[in-house]
Image: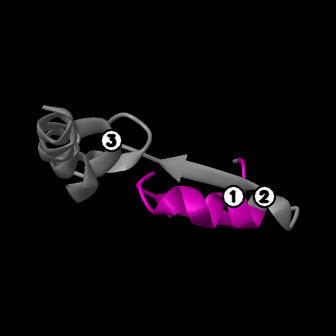
Amino acid sequence: MKTFDIIVIGSGAGLMVIEAALSAGMSCAIIEKSKFGGTCLTKGCIPSKMLVYPADLVRESEKA
């Protein structure tokens, strides 16, 4: 059986934990049920993404 220093469930915020652990020389594993990156990254629920279109509209209206 393979052993790891750290096992992270979910690759959303868990990727930061993995990055720190790998930098410290630890062996790591990630358990993820879907695509790496978590729901917000892969499904687009990051709130800032919602503001891109309105900001573009404001910028375009200022040019008119």
Q: Nearer the viewer, residue 13 or 49?
A: 49
Magenta stretch: includes residue 20: yes
Which residue bears the numbered disc 2?
22
Q: Label 3 crowding class (10 Å Cα cut-off): few <14, some 14-19, many 20+? A: few
- Give the amino acid at mark 1: Glu
- Give the amino acid at mark 3: Lys
Label 2, secondary structure: give it. helix
Q: CA distance from mark 3 to mark 1?
A: 19 Å
Magenta stretch: includes residue 6: yes
Q: In screen coordinates, is 32 left or right of 30?
A: left
Residue drawn at point x = 18 percent, y = 51 percent: 51
Is disc 2 in contact with disc 1, using a CB cutoff of under 8 Å?
A: yes
- Which numbered disc flags the more N-terminal residue, 2 or 3? 2
Q: CA distance from mark 2 to mark 3?
A: 21 Å
Query: Looking at the image, can residue 5 be seen?
Result: no
Is disc 3 in contact with disc 1, using a CB cutoff of under 8 Å?
A: no
Which residue bears the numbered disc 3?
33
- Which numbered disc flags the more N-terminal residue, 3 or 1? 1
Q: Which mark is residue 54?
A: none
Residue drawn at point x = 78 percent, y = 58 percent: 22
Label 1, secondary structure: give it. helix
Region rendered in magenta: 2-21
Q: In screen coordinates, is 53 left or right of 7?
A: left
Q: Return the x and y of residue 45 as percentages of the image width and height.
A: 19, 49
Which quadrant, please, contains the C terminus?
top left
Q: Label 2 crowding class (10 Å Cα cut-off): few <14, some 14-19, many 20+? A: some
Q: Nearer the viewer, residue 13 or 3?
A: 13
Residue drawn at point x = 23 percent, y = 43 percent: 52
Residue drawn at point x = 54 percent, y = 50 percent: 30
Q: Nearer the viewer, residue 44 or 63?
A: 63
Q: Quadrant of residue 9?
A: bottom left
Which residue bears the numbered disc 1?
19
